[in-house]
Amino acid sequence: SGADLEVKTWGDAWKEGPLQGLITFPIAFGLISFTNMIGATGVGQILSILIVTIIVRLLITLATFKTTMQQQKMTLLQPELNAIQVKYSGKTDEVSRQKMSQEMMKIYSKYGVNPLKSLIMPFISMPVFLCVYHAVNNTSILKTGTVFGVNLGDAMSTGILQGRWFAIVLFILMVAMQFASMKIPTWMQKYKTKKSGRRPDPRQSDSQKQANMMTNIFFVMIVFMGWMLPTSMTVYWIASSVVSLVQTIVTQTMLGKKSKQELMKK
């Protein structure tokens, strides 16, 4: 629906679907409320988007804390999984493949890790992103703000092609923060491996290569969408990336303060 969300009631939103009622309308309501409190002055609208984004991401973090910890555990387990895959590298017969799978499953079982849980986050983050986009794009009070000559309702590409320095800074900041938030888990794991004195295995596992490839593809998609979507969504992406960055650093630090055996128990 292209109608402004200000004129809807919560009941109207629920009629359009559970995501509209559960996520989109509350986000739009928060954006409108904070903008009215702070002021629809461009800067006020940016602050409103930042506040609502942080609240939404914190709620998601609380709701998916166990899944997040599982993801971090998977990162810590990767050297052991890589060692198993190296052990069976070049062996393509069915018996060897089965033994490799069994040994990997023993590692998962030993430390109480469910590899499927690491796939949950994309199925949560994408619907939330779409709901945020719908809320921001259909909230007219966010389309009127202008900051340093950049209209929040215009596509990011518009401000950049017009040579607006604020649009250029926002886009660079969005790209940098998104890249850092996606790469920080790998960077921290490499740092821990180096600090522990273990020699990293140069033969990267197929699963890790695939994960890196998917991360890179996702990053390129985000950069492309950031170029095309409204400037207000770039503000959302920056705030979301900062929260993800902080969340990763905090969880990795928490895990690092415990012994591996204590950490991995169910």
Image (cartoon, rainbow, N blue to C red):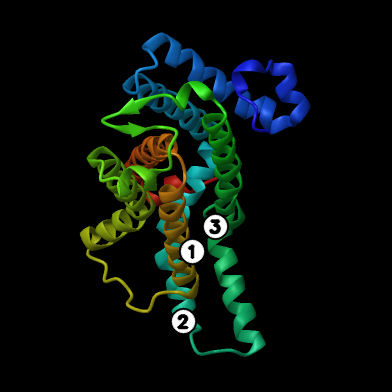
- Residue 118's tag is none
The residue positioned farthest toward the top in the image shown: 37
| Distance between mark 2 and mark 3 Cα atoms | 19 Å
Callout 2 amino acid: Lys
For the residue marked with disc 3, what is the amino acid?
Lys
Nearest to the eye among marks 2 and 3: give it.
2
Dot 3 surroundings within 10 Å: few (below 14), some, or many (20 or more)?
A: few
Which residue does the image show at 52% across and 24% down from the upper left? 140
Q: Position of residue 126 (x, y in %)?
A: 57, 45
Q: Which residue is mark 1?
A: 214
Element under label 2?
helix
- Whether residues under marks 2 and 1 lie with C-beta atoms below 8 angstroms apart, the answer is no
Can you name the residue that lies furthest to the right here? 15
Mark closer to the chain start, 2 or 1: 2
* Residue at the image point whose x is 36% and y is 48% from the top: 178
Mark count = 3
Pointer 3: what residue?
110
- Looking at the image, is mark 2 or mark 3 earlier in the sequence? 2
Q: Quadrant of residue 241?
A: top left
- Residue named by callout 2: 87
Camera-side residue of 223 and 153? 153
Q: In the image, residue 184 lies at what x, y percent?
A: 33, 52
Q: Secondary structure at mark 1?
A: helix
Q: Looking at the rendering, in which quadrant would you find the N terminus?
A: top right
Helix, strand or loop status at disc 3: helix
